[in-house]
Image (spheres, rainbow, N blue to C red):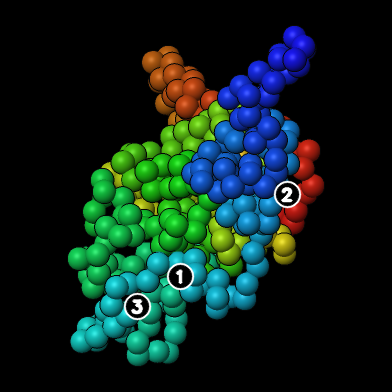
Amino acid sequence: MTCNEVNTAEEEASPGNAAQRVLGVAELVENVLQRLSLGDVLFNAQAVSHFWKNCVHGSPTIRKESFLTTNIVNEEDADDRLYMKPLREDFLHGRQRQREKIAQCIGIAMTSPTLAHVRKFAASDPARHFHDHQIALRFVYVCLQDEWSRFEANASHASWEAIIVQIKSSVMHPVLRLRLWGQNSCYWTGYGSHGVLYINDMAGSENFCFAAISDVVIRILMLVQHCPTASWIESSLAVPAFTTVTIAALKTQGHGRLSDVYHTETVHRETGVLIRDLLLLMARLAIKSLEKLDDDKIREARGRILVGRAEIKKVKDVEKMIRDVRGKTRPGIIAARELERLLKPARTVQTQA
């Protein structure tokens, strides 16, 4: 055997080359990918090589498991598969007062309303129906106190006013569970294929949750900056998919008590709303809400001068207030504009305020 033949045999026998050959076969890579966690498939495996990325996108099974395929179903199936249900369907049994009050709040002539009826009412007009939706939840809360933790109610405000997560975490994209969930002051509800995301900082004392929304946008921006072309950005939000999503920024009224909806943004896509659509919507909501808050606070501050209290100390206090407001809102606005810039090249979808 010649030296060249010996070297070739040694190279072929080496563990490194054997591994490379195995990981260069699509079927074997797909087998490996199916054993990885969803996070590894979405964030790490596709960074190994173009071949691995192509294997992820070329496998119908992996695409489906990785939210890369949108699954559109009818409204009844979507509602059944996306949303949480009380452990006892008859949780209002024997509670006539609660039944009547819930039905009255959501405007239905029904003796046995369900949590699905409350969700459907909220999703039909998230801004206008928010207050009545919260009152209805007040009576639901009385009946479900023993299982309220399942709905991830805000632990820092364990009263009937707590916003609750009503969508199953198991059906949602991992990025949403990581960045837009209860721990981030983000609470999901909705009905059928229309998801509603409320953003609120119950611990805050301001009349708008700019701290929560700024924090969410800044964290999402950092994630996107890591790889703005990553395939998870084109993933579906959930399985089955949402075709409409509304984001609502909430006001608070002293000690974090809920008051009203400050601003809403809605996106619709017949083929299923994608992560990119949601993040662009989030950026748009942050820019409009924070700029509106900025204008409102500055107008309020300057109004104090116009009513005749323009002493030097008062003027300085007003100027300081304006600087403080801008110092709090600007980071969120800047982050939202940069997020919008990174994601903007995607095809546009139908949106409405």
Residue wearing tag 2: 58
Front position in the image: 204 or 297: 204
Front residue of 5/284: it is 5
Structural distance between the alpha carbons of marks 1 and 2: 37 Å
With respect to residue 37, does 158 lie above or below?
Answer: below
Q: Residue at x 47, y 27 (%)?
A: 328
Q: How far across and how far down the image is residue 121, in percent?
A: 48, 73
Q: Quadrant of residue 21?
A: top right
Query: What amino acid type should be assigned to the residue bearing mark 2?
Result: Gly
Residue placed under numbered mark 3 in the picture: 102
Tell me the quadrant of the picture where the C terminus can be found.
bottom right
**Residue density around tag 2, few if under 14, some if 14–19, many if 20 or more, within 10 Å:** few
Tell me the residue that label 1 is attached to: 119
* Mark 2 or mark 3, earlier in chain: 2
Q: Say which label, 3 or 1, has the lower sequence index.
A: 3
Q: Amino acid at mark 1?
A: Arg
Disc 3/disc 1 C-alpha distance (Å) = 12 Å
The answer to which image quadrant residue 150 occupies is bottom left
- Within 10 Å of disc 1 (Cα), the crowding (few <14, some 14-19, many 20+) is many
The label nearer to you, 2 versus 3, is 2
Is residue 308 depicted above or below 81 in this figure? above
Q: Answer yes or no: do the residues labelled 3 and 1 have beta carbons within 8 Å? A: no
| Residue type for callout 3 | Ile
Tell me the element at label 2: helix
Residue 14, position as x, y percentages in the image: 61, 21
Residue found 79% across the figure and 47% down from its top: 347
Q: Position of residue 270 (x, y in %)?
A: 72, 64
User: Which is more N-terminal, label 2 or label 1?
Assistant: 2
Tell me where residue 39 appears, x and y as whole percent: 51, 41
